Image (spheres, rainbow, N blue to C red):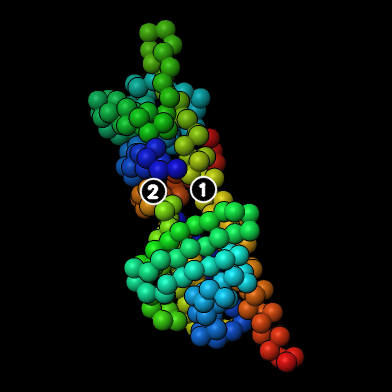
Amino acid sequence: MEVQREIVLPTTREDAWEALTEPGRLEQWFATEVELDLREGGAAVFRWGDGDSRHAEVVTVEDEERLVLRFDDGVVDLRLADDADGTRVLVRETSPGWSTALELSALALCAAA
Amino acid sequence: MRGGVDRVFDALADPTRRFVLEVLAGRESASQSELAAQVPVTRQAVAKHLSTLAAAGLVRSERRGRETRYALEGTPLEEAAAWLDRVGAEWDGRLAALARHVEERASAETYT
């Protein structure tokens, strides 16, 4: 079971990668306080002003290409790609307890129910 | 949202079970023999699929006189849909914030 979203950022791959991986940049748009040990197996901690925090482990780091973080309640997979208008960021969040066998028909049923 | 939801998606992985759910979605309730008439498998197989669906909380059964009626239970699927909605909305918000951050930085650089 996964959610996918994407956005095109009007900037370079290098800048987009920094915005996604440098704690000082992440603190400007993602969380209030960020610790990120950017290597496979490294730890990440995100804290928000309301006292909420999330811990993650870095699963994959491919410079300016891909960052995968495993949280206790899901896996976040971020990919970068070149785009005519800048850099495309594709995010997929997968919930581990949920089989990927889910098909849309199931959700259509839900809507019908 | 683990565990129970896992069972839901395992139950949904089978096409015959999805078909049973579709049939049930189209009516208030059905008996095993009514389902067997519509689903191209044996009555025994329908019974087995119904018990898997019931264990996942997707179908509820109710005795009415001498027969058991089966009906769709929407809640587990609603939970799944709610997860998709919530996580999707979270990412919409985060990616919008990311875009603002990148744009603000770019314009700050232009003016300094």
Reply above or below: A54 against A64.
Answer: above
Mark 2 vs mark 1: same chain?
no
Q: Is residue B49 left or right of residue A34?
A: left
| SS of the residue under disc 2 | loop
Looking at the image, which residue is at 24% across and 25% down? B44
| SS of the residue under disc 1 | helix
Q: Which residue is mark 1?
A: B83
Nearer to the camera, A84 or A72: A72
Q: Is residue A15 left or right of residue B5?
A: right
Furthest residue to the right? Answer: B111
Q: Are marks 2 and 1 in contact (CB under 8 Å)?
A: yes
Characterize the local packing of mark 1: few (<14), some (14-19) or many (20 or more) Cα atoms within 10 angstroms.
some
Q: Position of residue A26 (x, y in %)?
A: 56, 71
Task: Specify the amino acid type for callout 2.
Answer: Trp
Q: Position of residue B54 (x, y in %)?
A: 37, 28
Nearer to the camera, A7 or B23: A7
Q: Is residue B99 left or right of residue A3?
A: right
Looking at the image, which residue is at 34% across and 68% down? A41
Reply above or below: B53 against B79.
Answer: above
Q: Which residue is mark 2?
A: A98
Letter of the chain that mark 2 sits on in the rendering: A
Does the image show residue A83? Answer: no
- Residue A77 image-quadrant placement: bottom left
Q: Position of residue B45 (x, y in %)?
A: 26, 29
Looking at the image, which residue is at 47% across and 30% down? B73
Reply above or below: A76 against B59.
Answer: below
